[in-house]
Image (tube, helix red, strand yellow):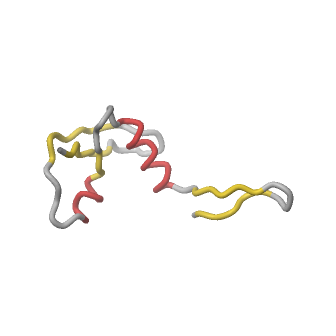
Amino acid sequence: MEGLLGSQNVRGYDIIGDTVNTAKRICDHAKADEILLSQTCYEALSPPPAVVETRQVKVKGKTQALELLVLE
């Protein structure tokens, strides 16, 4: 969900939800100059980019670990 939040006097634009939270947690696991993708995002790309390695990471709010792909 995205939009303006607040009152008549104070407003702020924000995005909230599971997708946003998951993306933030994936970013938190990236090292300097590293690009991480979820398996779902990777499968949506055509042609798929080269993968250097895969990682299983446990993130807050998810019962199962996410499989993240480290791109070249």
Indicate the position of residue 42 as horizontal and vertical percent values: 24, 57
Position of the N terminus, as image quadrant, is bottom right
Q: Which residue in the rendered view is the most extreme toward the right? A: 9
- The quadrant holding residue 64 is top left
Task: Say which residue appears at 29% left-offset and 45% top-offset.
Answer: 36
Image quadrant in which the C terminus is located: top left
Counting from the top left corner in percent of width and height, residue 8 is at 85, 62
At 47% from the left and 44% from the top, the residue drawn is 61
At a point 32% along the width and 37% down the height, the residue shown is: 57
Q: Is residue 52 above or below residue 45?
A: above
Residue 26 percent location from the top left of the image: 38, 43
- Comparing 39 with 60, the one in front is 39
Question: Which residue is farthest top?
Answer: 32
- In the picture, measured across the screen, residue 52 lies left or right of residue 16, that is left
Q: Position of residue 28 (x, y in %)?
A: 41, 37
- Which of the 4 image quadrants contains residue 63? top left
